């Protein structure tokens, strides 16, 4: 028994270091602020169309568009989409459009029955765009003036077709920061985004805050048409493009891109309601298997150390230390603080609860409500992009 514990503990520690720690170290070295000084700018700047989709984001849309208007990119247009908003989003877009000809407002009043709202808005924006590159972004993202210029330079110098930037998270309370940091950690571990550069189509990534796509590649893959009923639209866009042979990469944006993902700790949990279960393909068995495996991976070291003592448990002690180190490192990487390190267990329990809550609510109501529209579960399952 002691030998089994000894081997199991060190295997678990190795899994933490290689499966989570190594990707975080690589991504730390691949932050845009660190790479920016060495990026060579092109002789000719391609035209870029920024497609910003917003529904009932009146308080944020003006800040987002203003930060984009401050961009130093030389050939830029903004397609600002008001997707059936009932607040001041539309008037805010129209007001800014009168101050700068680079903003082209697009107001959507009806949603076709075979589309999800945001996906339809992005598709409409792409159809209206004139640029040779399209940047899909959300209406609550804050840009630095040089962000797009540096990102396009990186994409061109590395001959990419798709570049994703993961933003820094602006958080409020300590509890919110702990939850957001753990979600970022499992996103990094689940996607293994540091390997996105490999040509294999099975490793892909996409982030709604910043998906920069070469227009020809986007159109040859069918645009958002194959994804018209996908809740996880950003991630699936990365999958779609990779399947069509595109060269892709992901960097951490650092200070170049920021977002206030949620307003509180509780809204961090409720914010996963629509897409938590979607991440498992709306499969109960897959969701339970993944969550139970993750829980075992996280909590086994703590359980063993509580129940057993002696040299045979040293591997589990190392695994426990490695998990907290990875959690703290991931928090710093995505814009939080190392101070969240002691909250690994409660934060992970909170995010696991959020996924279970998403599954229960989706099953109970028979679908997903998103942007004031209800989508039946049977249709979401049938139209999944696989």
Image (cartoon, rainbow, N blue to C red):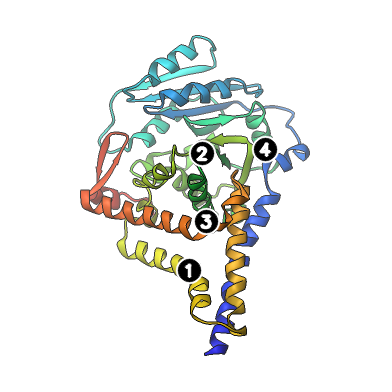
Outermost residue to the top:
98
Would residue 134 appear left or right of 280 to someone viewing this image?
A: right
User: Pointer 4: what residue?
Assistant: 156
- Seen at 65% across and 52% down, the residue is 27
Hey, which quadrant is residue 314 in on the image? bottom right
**Distance (Cα) linking label 1 and label 3:** 13 Å
**Distance (Cα) linking label 3 and label 2:** 15 Å
User: Pointer 1: what residue?
Assistant: 299
Would residue 132 appear left or right of 84 to someone viewing this image?
A: right
Q: Are marks 4 and 3 in contact (CB under 8 Å)?
A: no
**Distance (Cα) linking label 2 and label 1:** 27 Å
Please provide percent x and percent y for residue 154.
68, 39
Count numbered badges in the picture. Answer: 4
- Seen at 44% across and 47% down, the residue is 236
Q: Which callout, 4 or 1, points at the residue further toward the start of the chain? A: 4
Outermost residue to the right:
38
Q: Which callout, 4 or 3, points at the residue further toward the start of the chain? A: 4
**Distance (Cα) linking label 2 and label 4:** 36 Å
Mark 4 crowdedness (10 Å alpha carbons): few <14, some 14-19, many ≥20: some
Label 1 element class: helix
Residue 343's label in the rendered image is: 3
User: Pointer 2: what residue?
Assistant: 172
Mark 1 crowdedness (10 Å alpha carbons): few <14, some 14-19, many ≥20: some
């Amino acid at each position: 028994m002691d030998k089994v514990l000894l081997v199991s503990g060190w295997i678990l520690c190795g899994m933490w270091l290689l499966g989570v720690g190594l990707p975080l170290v690589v991504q730390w070295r691949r932050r845009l602020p660190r790479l920016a000084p060495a990026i060579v700018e092109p002789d000719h700047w391609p035209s870029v169309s920024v497609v910003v989709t917003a529904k009932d984001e009146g308080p944020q849309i003006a800040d987002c568009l203003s930060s984009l208007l401050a961009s130093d990119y030389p050939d830029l247009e903004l397609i600002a989409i008001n997707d059936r908003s009932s607040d001041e989003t539309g008037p805010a877009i129209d007001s800014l459009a009168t101050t700068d000809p680079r903003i082209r407002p697009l107001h959507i009043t009806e949603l076709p029955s075979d589309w999800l709202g945001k996906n339809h808005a992005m598709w409409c924006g792409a159809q209206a765009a004139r640029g040779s590159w399209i940047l899909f972004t959300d209406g609550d993202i804050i840009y630095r003036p040089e962000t797009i210029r540096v990102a396009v330079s990186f994409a061109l110098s590395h001959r990419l077709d798709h570049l994703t930037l993961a933003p820094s998270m602006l958080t409020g309370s300590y509890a919110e920061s702990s939850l957001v940091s753990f979600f970022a950690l499992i996103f990094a571990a689940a996607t293994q985004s540091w390997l996105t550069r490999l040509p294999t189509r099975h490793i892909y990534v996409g982030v709604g805050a910043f998906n920069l796509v070469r227009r020809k590649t986007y159109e040859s893959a069918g645009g958002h048409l194959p994804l018209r009923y996908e809740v996880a639209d950003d991630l699936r866009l990365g999958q779609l493009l990779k399947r069509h042979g595109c060269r892709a990469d992901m960097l951490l944006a650092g200070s170049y891109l920021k977002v206030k993902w949620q307003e509180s700790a509780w809204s961090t949990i409720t914010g996963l309601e629509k897409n938590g279960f979607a991440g498992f393909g709306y499969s109960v068995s897959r969701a339970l298997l993944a969550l139970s495996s993750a829980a075992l991976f996280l909590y086994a070291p703590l359980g063993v150390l509580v129940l057993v003592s002696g040299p045979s448990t040293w591997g589990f002690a190392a695994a426990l230390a490695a998990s907290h180190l990875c959690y703290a490192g991931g928090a710093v990487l995505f814009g939080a603080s190392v101070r969240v390190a002691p909250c690994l267990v409660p934060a992970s329990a909170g995010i696991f609860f959020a996924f279970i809550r998403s599954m229960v609510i989706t099953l109970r109501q028979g679908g997903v409500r998103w942007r004031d529209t209800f989508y039946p579960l049977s249709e979401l399952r049938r139209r999944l992009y696989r």
